[in-house]
Amino acid sequence: MPTAGLLRVHRASNVSDAVPRRIAHAGIDALRVQSVYRSVVNITTADGLLTVASPEGGGLPNGILADLGPDWRAVGLYPGMVVSASDASVRVPDAGLEIQFDAASRWSPRLQSSAEAADAATARWGRRTAAARTIAQARGSAGGFGALLRDDVFHDPVGILGVARPILAELVVALEAGDRRLAAEVATRLIGLGPGLTPSGDDVLVGIEAALHALARPSAGFLALAMGDVEERTTELAATLLRHAAAGEFAERLHTPLAALLGSDDEAIPAAIDRAVAWGATSGTDCLLGLLTGLDVAAGVRAALS
Amino acid sequence: MSPVQSRIFPNSYRDSVELMQIAAEIESLAGIDRAGLVMATPANREVLAAAGLLSEATASAGPNDLVVAVASDDESAATHALERAAERLAGPGTEGPSETARTEARTLAEGVAEVGANLALISTPGTYAAAEALKALKRGLNVFLFSDNVSVEDEIELKSMARRRGLLLMGPDCGTAILDGVPLGFANAVRPGTIGLVGASGTGLQQVSCLIDRYGAGVSQAIGVGGRDLDERVGGTMMLAALERLSADPGTALIVLISKPPAASVAELVLAAASAVGKPVIINFLGGDPEAIIAAGAIPAATFEAAAAIASAMALGRPIPDDDAPATAARDDGVGSAEDDESSIAVREAQAGLDQTQSRIRGLYSGGSLAGEAKLVLRASLGAKGASLHEIVDLGDDEYTVGRPHPMIDPRLRNEHLAAAAADPSTAVILLDVVLGYGANADPAGALASAIHAARADAAREGRRFAVVASVCGTSRDPQDLVAQEARLAEAGVILAPSNAQAAVLAARIVAPAAVAAGGHG
């Protein structure tokens, strides 16, 4: 095994504001590699997952961005390895690896919103929602909850879509009424529902919360009321991202399409939707479904779902 | 309700794309009624329970555990499906080092240094593909760029660099190639020979190479250049480079070029290069004008089948068939063409099963170029107005495949559309392509046959019948075996044609025999 003296040092390019906070809160011991993918490593902490990812996917609320090579499964990292962390770096001694983030640019996962700008954006959204939904229908994934963007559901062998559709419609009604407590109760039924490592229901909820947050709507923050025992109800990764969303912190891949969907340039929307749906197998489309639903709620547009 | 078998994979952290692929695979296995593959969160466990897919064993699983459940009346099929899922989940992924770990090159640098590679096959998501291709070109590697969603600006830059360095950049979205006998992407096991192919069309290249094999000739090289290569912005850079390579290749006696009609300026460049190549060149610009091709001293071919028939005849020293009658070449195993008595009987039988309201052809294609060829053949057979009544859909198009496996890999999408088309009372003929070869589904005919049986049973309950016409693009040496796949379809009552063009002609004959006999322009 490589020793600490032979560490390969990688310098991170970007680190979320929330990462040092997480490390400080969770402590620096008893961290372990949870999972390793081609360009992502998840590390278990006492306060949710810490994610190291390649820069192409953009900033993550729980993330450090670094380039560890073309295939991270081939750099000697394995689940269960002990990790040590400080406010400047993350080390995996058994893999001979250190990722330094003290010189990385700091990125804030918090979505900025101002009521004034939000009013203009909301009015614009009312005019463009139908066109955006049409583009999303054509380009979104048919897997996950993407089929709920359309009226036709071809493939639902287990019946998950049949369960999700009425819950989502119920959530829209609660949010439109500005009833955050009722919305939270309904949201708990979507948590952990659906396929994928971050179940589709969780991705949709993150998207809805992001939209409401960006437009400074009174119902923003409903998700915080639904967190309770979230770790018991969904996967570790999804629970981490839901908790960040409940705190108003979102991945850059949600910031970017939101900026385009609410911006002044109509022509930027197709490309933004393309980028949004390109994330994961179904997560991108599921988050987009959430964004569109949340924006419709904020703009008072009755979604096709309800 | 069918009995359920299930299995838990504790703390299984596979990414969503992989989970989706595994779910699709086990669901399409023979004998499986339904399958679920989800993280065992309380919400998902409830849904599985309601669907009758939750067993006692899985009821206690936690949210970080993966549960795989299958319902089947066939116990051994269910066991096999779970074993298959376990195999896939035990494959390379997040596991620690294994004793049998292979020392494969993991970076471009290792590939060049350890293997002496001269080509990189790149199949990363489009966002990263251009950067990887650029690295490969800088290391002096030819590139087979399987990835799609690469911008045209990146394509132009990559191809310019490749040209300057004397390298090939095949793609982006390059579906197939056969280089020195090595198949890349979706390619077929075709006989080696003296015909060199260059194509801006994935399934077009596959169809031509398979028909060449069927006619008894063989392929020296098949070079895919990506669907946009002959776009004005890209300028046919790689078709010109490939033409130069084949011109200099002593193993290539004649050359076939395949593409949609190029931009006029690009056509001029390609035709000029073809006239200077010093070897016979057959050109199939699908739906393009043959006059310019003839003027350049090359031989036009209206369809993929015509291109293959002309090239094979030339390679084998046989008389060149008339391009207007491409459906006459018999395959080397003695099976006749669509014009023989057997097909006429099949057409009459199909017509006898239709009522007055059934008039439409519904083409459900997995290959985009094959769908394009079918549209062209229908226009030639039925006239533009007649052809416009029918629908040919390319289910491999991005519109249908974002987030889903391509229908050449996963039959579910097409089966869903097949059921919908069969339920439409106006449907007379369902027209299909079945593409075999490396990378394609292990048993596409089997998957289709089950869907056809189910759709026919549904239609029969409403007192309707419909015809299914198909061609199989493949060879008897393909992993799926052409003969076995055709037999499976024939058992399911599918009317088979030896080529896609002939399948489209057969479909047209079923719905409009008078128009076809009159040449379609009435």
Image: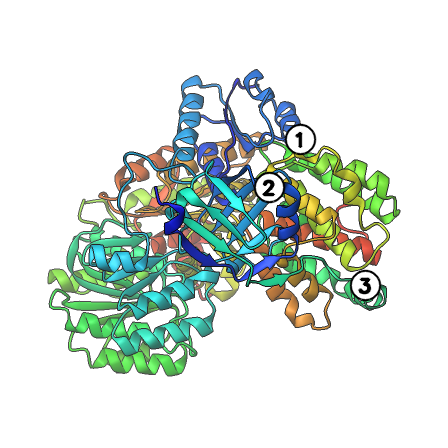
Task: Give the residue displayed 19% in from the left and 78% down from the top.
Answer: B277
**Lower sequence index among marks 1 and 2:** 1
Identify which residue, B168 or A49, lies in the foreground. Answer: A49
Tell if the residue under mark 1 belongs to the same chain as the one under mark 2: yes
Q: Which amino acid does label 3 sit on?
A: Thr
The quarter of the picture where residue B86 lies is top left
User: What chain does mark 2 sit on?
Assistant: A
Which-is-in-front pick, marks 2 and 3? 2
Query: How busy is the neighbourhood of tag 2: few (under 14 within 10 Å), some, or many (20 plus)?
Result: many
- Residue holding disc 1: A232
- Residue holding disc 3: A122
- Residue holding disc 2: A237
Task: Give the residue displayed 86% in from the left and 52% down from the top.
Answer: A218
Q: Which amino acid does label 1 sit on?
A: Glu
Which-is-in-front pick, marks 1 and 3? 1
**Lower sequence index among marks 1 and 3:** 3
